Image: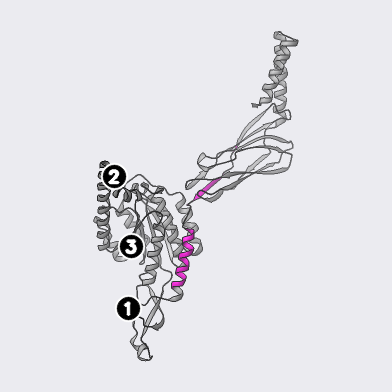
Amino acid sequence: MVVTGRLAALAAVAGVVVVVALPSWIGVVVATGVLVLLAAIDTVLAGNGSGLELSRPELTTVRTGRATEVELTMVNTGTRTLRGLVWDAWPDSAGAEYRTRRIRLRPNTRTRSTTALRPTHRGDRVAGPITVRLFGPLGLAGRQLRRDAPARVRALPPFRSERVLAAKVRQLQQLEGRTVMNARGQGSEFDSFREYVAGDDVRAIDWRATARATDVLVRTWRPERNRHVLLLLDTGRTAAARVGAGTRLDVAIEAALLLGGLAAAAGDTADLLAFDREPRAEVRGTSGKALQPKLMHALSGVVPTLVETDTAALIRTALQRARRRSLIVWFTALDPALTDDTLLPTLTNRHRVLLVSPTDPDLATAATDHTTLSALYTAATAETLRTERALTRERLRRKGIAVVTAAPTHLPEALADEYLELKRSGAI
């Protein structure tokens, strides 16, 4: 049972009446009895809410940082008019702007209310139970009940590189339309002949076709479709490091979504594996328009795990997922320990490997700050770290692993350019 401010105001009026008209214990008892009787009658007339049905969509998706609405449907299947308040509970991280609504439902009627949500971080937010307070016709007292209406909102990655994807897809279409490759690369198919121009690889010259023509002809090759790309995300402790405005994992997810969309446009199949000591998210055997939505849903709930990544287990799992020759795009930190892993040759012998790692803008800034003695020491440390990473990059290159590094805001586009270059050269 709940009471309202109206009952408190009525009690104050009754107190004044008792003091003025009947200042005795009898007056107090009579006034109290009347108030209790009115509250009891109002509670009985409010009903128990057994005929109230509540429902919400089980899953609502929205891009992180954008607004959405979740609709609550209320149906009165009983025989009494229901009056009261409805409180729609959402966690604070869902960014709910509206939670309480006054209702008046006649028998066999339906109404809807919406709650505006704006989540600021990736992942699922589960709604709490719905609290309903039903009041009688006098508005003095009523009943409070809670109902479960399962609902959650899934905040997908923001994917700020969506405009970049459209531009890169146009480049891909131009690449496939012009068939500009003039050297046979692994995974390319013959397309046509064209005249030799300065700068073409002489190995692409077709001497038989040249003998039948008046000009020197070179073979052109169309990028082969239906190749396999494995997106490998390291979700260990290094993924929690801050680079720019977000974490290393946030940057990796942005770049993976851009590459996934580009691979789908190229007709390739892209798989995803997020791993530290065990798989955290996985997408397998998807291509075309269905690829990017699956990647978004799979990556929405992935967060860094504060454990050391088991690199050997990660490589073994990647080898199990990539049975045929693939392009493995590995999002991780430029750690010198990577060069000591004994499984790397197995990975590079079977597949083409790209290691993708964002650079830290703060580190670059610190390396150039020589204004004070303290800043000079910091600059020396920053320059040492940059040198170590440059050496690691060179060692990885010698082991057959190409490395793509760029500032967080430019890394997705740099990775897309590298993928297009591999397509252009016939390397995949």
- In this figure, which residue is indicated by the disc labeled 2? 371
Q: Please, is residue 402 above or below residue 364 in the view?
A: below
**What is the crowding at mark 2: few (fewer than 14 residues within 10 Å), some, or many (at least 20)?**
few
Residue 201: numbered disc? 1
Looking at this view, name the residue that lies furthest to the top.
24
Q: Is residue 348 visible?
A: yes
Q: Secondary structure at mark 3?
A: strand
Q: Secondary structure at mark 1?
A: loop
Percent position of residue 234, x then y: 36, 52
**Cα gap from disc 1 to disc 2, whole angstroms:** 51 Å
Q: Secondary structure at mark 2?
A: loop
**Label 1 is placed on what type of residue?**
Asp
Quadrant into which the C terminus falls: bottom left
Q: Earlier in the sequence, mark 2 or mark 3?
A: 3
Q: Residue at x 53, y 49 (%)?
A: 66
Q: Residue at x 45, y 49 (%)?
A: 301
Quick check: is 23 in the magenta stretch? no
**Cα gap from disc 2 to disc 3, whole angstroms:** 41 Å
**Cα gap from disc 1 to disc 3, whole angstroms:** 25 Å
Q: Which residues are magenta?
A: 147-175
Q: Please, is residue 1 above or below residue 108 in the view?
A: above
Q: Nearer the viewer, mark 1 or mark 2?
A: 2
- In this figure, which residue is indicated by the disc labeled 3? 353
Residue 418: numbered disc? none
Residue 230 image-quadrant placement = bottom left
Colour option used: one colour
Quick check: is 167 in the magenta stretch? yes
Q: Earlier in the sequence, mark 1 or mark 3?
A: 1
**Decide: marks 1, 2 in contact (CB < 8 A)?**
no
